[in-house]
Amino acid sequence: MAVGRIWVVTESSGGVASPAGLELLAAARRLAPVVEAVHWGGDAAEVAAVLGGHGATRILTVGDLEGALPAVPVAAALAARIEASGPPDAVFLTASYDQRDLAGRLSARLDRPVLTNAVGVTEGADGLLAEHAAFGGSTVVRARITAPPPHLFVFRPRTFAAEAAGGPPADVEVLAVPDTGAAGAATIVHRHVAERAGPALDEASVVVAGGRGLGDPSRFGLIEQLARRLGGAPAGTRAVVDAGWVPYSYQVGQTGTTVKPTVYLACGISGATQHLVGMKGARHIVAINKDRDAPIFGVADLGVVGDVTKVLPRLLEALDARDDRGGTQ
Amino acid sequence: MEWVGEYAGMKVAVCVKQIPDPATPGRLDPTTNTLVRDGKLILDDSDAYGVEMGLQLVDAAGGGEVVLVSMAPHRETGGLRTALAMGADRAVLVSDDALAGSDALGTAKVLAAAIRPLGADLVLAATESTDGYTGTTPVQLAELLGLPSVTFAKRVELEGGGLRVRRQTEAGYDEVTCPLPALVTVTAGVVEPRYPSFKGIMGAKNKPVDVHTVADLGLDPAAAGWSGARQVIVDVAPSEQRRAGEVVEDQGDAHQAIIRFLEQIKVL
């Protein structure tokens, strides 16, 4: 069953396309001859060149949503487009806040199942096979949808590498939004952008993460300091997020953000499968933990058996001293 | 405060999942390739936040009702009793062998059928379960019920006859207003779930749990369970494993090993 057409959901802001959509365009292009981008916001014309350059021949845009949360109007517009002109074989989405909502809305509206948390996709004899990491990533489960198209897949961010294809700017097709009634009534009245000194967690090349081994929320300052010192992003486990030490946006793991930095420093983290699945893609892993048998040491390139509350202050001090000497020792 | 009147008698339905204890390792059934769900089920930790939020909002509304809604095999109520002990008023449980193998959409259809007759002003759920973490069921449910939804709520307040919600975003958070009835999913840590008191635990034993089958709810059995899922697991294989590297004991000098490592990989 050859795949003919894939819709890739993209997000953009102020004319800048987010990397996740470009990653999915690269994957979709390898699987289908026709790849089209789904878009909302007022900047379709501005992103036509970059989306076209990454393989989209057309942008299906819902336009400016004027503060409405996107999932309901975008799902309604796509359903109407499918009603009028037929479905694509598949829709690829990223596990972002808005697109997880969109996946749910589309699935229920079209009465189609959705496969989420995919970390890969291949073409099988009977259609697309989505790969899922199970049991902390020790197992790969491949699944296929047997319902009629469109087949909905939600991928974890950073699953694929974005790659320009050199195509011309994409055509822009504006989709009308049908009346969404009460379901479409949630409205954004204010957008708060958190002040962030360093890089975004999912884009940082260095991630310094703290777990319950820190013992006390006040010691999370050590994680923040080391992240700042290395030009990286601070992060936490589900345990410290649940305990209220840091906000949800810090969370790395199965529930939370997936990161693929150059180096991941796991500080006071035992390595529960819930956590490992979100960080095992790091190129290098350094772990500090008191318990020699902690699972985190099974994936670490360098493991330090020790008290993180003692090692981190010494590490910060040594980095300062190293700076004063002007570089390598 | 006039808003108290506006919300008086507010009915909150809280979706809760009863899951195998996450502390015990999961496994797949070798013939069906789905998670094995035998043994005792407990309240998913993620759902304790929704239960707490429901209790607090009903308090703020000046009274009302918190109804738990759950789908579980074998008329399992272990997790429901925990949430009832926290203070929820009653529970609706859908339990039917025909539901085995249900996917997220099938589950949403079942929950929608169970919630529709309640006439809830607000439906609360976790952002995703701890065991399956598909994370789409609540929004599928909202679509089936024709409700607006606000997901990833960090804060929920009653305002102007509706809700004002802080919704987590990649950049920070959005302030979102939403009329009622609505569905909201709450992130972990949004409120501090109370511990059930002794009185609560004793009282929970006598709180009503209505158990429904698929037929009771007027659902087509083909819409849920294995056949309704319309997806199959093709194969299961071990993934490429990372190999453990060097492990050193800290003798007061381990920070030097870390610095050398960071230099080697050119992070320093």
Image: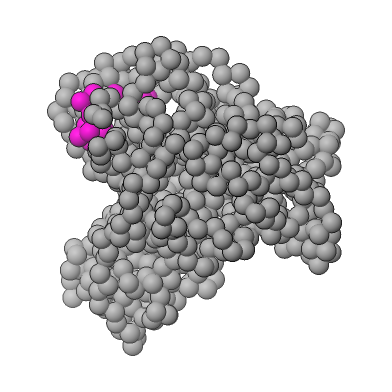
Q: Residue A156: x and y, percent?
A: 37, 45
Q: Which residue is rendered at x = 59% and y = 64% of the image?
A: B39
Note whether residue A246 is visible: no
Q: Which residues are magenta?
A: A24-39
Q: Residue A116: x and y, percent?
A: 42, 42
A220, above or below A184, in the image: below
Q: Residue A304: x and y, percent?
A: 33, 78
Q: Residue A11: x and y, percent?
A: 37, 31
> Which residue is nearer to you in this view: A146 or B201?
A146
On the image, which quarter does residue A252 sit in?
Answer: bottom left
> Which residue is nearer to you in this view: A229 or A211?
A211
Coloured how? one colour
Taking the magenta stretch, the answer to whether it contains residue A38 is yes
Count how many numbered circles sit on residues in the image. 0
Q: Which residue is rendered at x = 77% and y = 59% of the image?
A: B85
Q: Which residue is rendered at x = 48% and y = 55% of the image?
A: B35
Q: Which residue is rendered at x = 48% and y = 25% of the image?
A: A110
Note whether residue B44 is visible: yes
> Which residue is nearer to you in this view: B229 or A282?
B229
Q: Is residue A176 left or right of residue B145?
A: left
Q: Is residue B208 left or right of residue B92?
A: right
On the image, which quarter does residue B37 sit in?
Answer: bottom right
Q: Farthest left residue?
A: A166
If the image is split into quadrants, where does the C terminus of chain A sit? bottom left
> Which residue is nearer to you in this view: B249 or A217?
B249
If the image is split into quadrants, where does the N terminus of chain A sit? top left
Taking the magenta stretch, the answer to whether it contains residue B241 is no
